[in-house]
Amino acid sequence: MTAIATSAALSFPFSFCRSTKTYTRKCFKGGFGVFAVYEEAAGELTNKKSSWLTIFDVEDPRTKFPQSKGKFLDANQALEVARFDIQYCDWRARQDVLTIMHLHEKVVEVLNPLAREYKSIGTVKKELAELQEALSQAHKQVHISEVRVSAALDKLAYMEALVNDRLLPERSAEESDCPISSPSTSTVPRDTVKSKQPRRTLNVSGPVQEYSPHLKNFWYPVAFTADIKDDTMIPIDCFEEPWVIFRGKDGKPGCVRNTCAHRACPLHLGSVKEGRIQCPYHGWEYSTDGKCEKMPSTKFLNVKIKSLPCFEQEGMIWIWPGNDPPTATLPSLLPPSGFQIHAEIVMELPVEHGLLLDNLLDLAHAPFTHTSTFAKGWSVPSFVKFLTPASGLQGYWDPYPIDMEFRPPCMVLSTIGISKPGKLEGQSTQECSTHLHQLHVCLPASRQKTRLLYRMSLDFAPILKHIPFMQYVWRHFAEQVLNEDLRLVIGQQNRMLNGANIWNLPVSYDKLGVRYRIWRDAVESGAKQLPFSK
């Protein structure tokens, strides 16, 4: 029974009587007694009960659990297991609803005026309290069943997609590899010809190619608002071009090329004077639109350096490095409601931004890589998978309580349930009482360098935000985690530059990383309709 069906069942009245009439009569003590007279005959009531109860008369499916055939990770067998989960959840949900119905009938029985005449008030109160507790437990069990149904449906969708991904290429390969022959000349039956389709791979090898202009046509976060004061500058590289961020006279941020038009001196080595950036070499000054407004000691010339569209939103500075007109709206990267931002950290990392995204979108490596930090003590699950809609770039990890999303063009958002540090298996994010929300922005600085913006938010312990030097504690921990990753990702990058394919053999838990690569390939090729865009 699905969660919708369960809710519908709970909305039905649990009394099987059509209608009742009531009358009162004077009691011997002067009070009035209330008696219910049922219009329905006993036989009709019994028949109606029986017709309703038939929906709960379902055989326990646990006696029919699919037996293993000895094939490791066989897709068809896994699909059967997922279908069994659905059947079990259906049976379990029906039993839960039936329990609530029986308890409801007991409550009606206890409250019956005839029954109350033979019981003391204390006895009735005690019985009602016990029934209330039993009903509460039954309702909790119903909610658990709903969660199980939802998870089982997600698992079934995942398994069906897995089977289709495996079977469709095999069928097409069989059809294409079988020679077409007439019945008179064919000597081998068609069904005996078998062909094995090689596992699907991605080709990510060799030096990183020059960035496609299509990849630049997005809004990119480049800095945190708190880091840019009225008199400060932030130099950045984006797509192998140098830029500098500063605030103009109106306090709004601007982004101009970090190269003076005069002698190519880096402008960030200078200073900000009254909303203009001053070159330290000869004092030329530029506004946020790139126009040179001061040119000391010489005749003034009409000079301008390149600038980019630059906006400030929700504590972040955004730029549009592409040639196409920028879109009217910027994405929202705020943490969910109820979270407070505790740390905002910026790092420059010596790896290509796609490799870093591959790493961030993969959680299966945690118990092997992060053994000195957040995954210390984690057990190694027998099977790790990422459950996601058929056309989406977000989902959740199983068995870890972590929801994750790739947000184009270079952001990863994740929400981590925290209840038992070091023992994360067996719970969903919703089942955890406290959570950590993370934002990773992987700005492509160059083909071997990434500017990482990291924002961490919590929905608990707000006092931590006000402890002095806590920002340095968070930064130290973030650096420890990243260093565990970097030694591996830098090694991957070196192998890739020498021709190795870093996506040679993707498996089930690589789904989100593979989808990112498919999305990026489509963007760089100029596809009009991007995959996973729903």
Image (cartoon, rainbow, N blue to C red):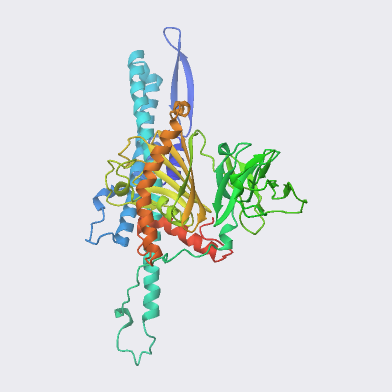
Q: Residue at x 47, y 63 (%)?
A: 208
Q: Residue furthest right?
A: 299
Residue at the far left: name it: 70
Image vertical order of residue 149 relative to residue 274, above or below? below
Whether residue 459 is visible to the viewer of this picture, yes or no, is no
How far from the left and from the top, in percent, is residue 56? 35, 43
Q: Give 357 or 73, whichever is nearer the viewer.
A: 357
Foreground of the two, 122 or 292: 292
Q: Quadrant of the C terminus?
A: bottom right
Residue name at image x 63 percent, y 41 percent: 271
- Considering every residue shown, the one lying at the far top of the view is 29
Q: Position of residue 85 (x, y in %)?
A: 33, 50
Is residue 228 visible in this depiction of the protein?
yes
Residue 347 location (% of width, % of height): 47, 45
Q: Position of residue 481 (x, y in %)?
A: 37, 43
Give the mark count. Answer: 0
For this rendering, which residue is in front, 459 or 496?
A: 496
In the image, residue 480 above or below residue 489 = above
Q: Residue furthest bottom?
A: 184
- The one of 285 and 448 positioned closer to us in this rendering: 285
Q: Is residue 351 above or below residue 100?
A: below
> Looking at the picture, does residue 50 appear above or below residue 319?
above
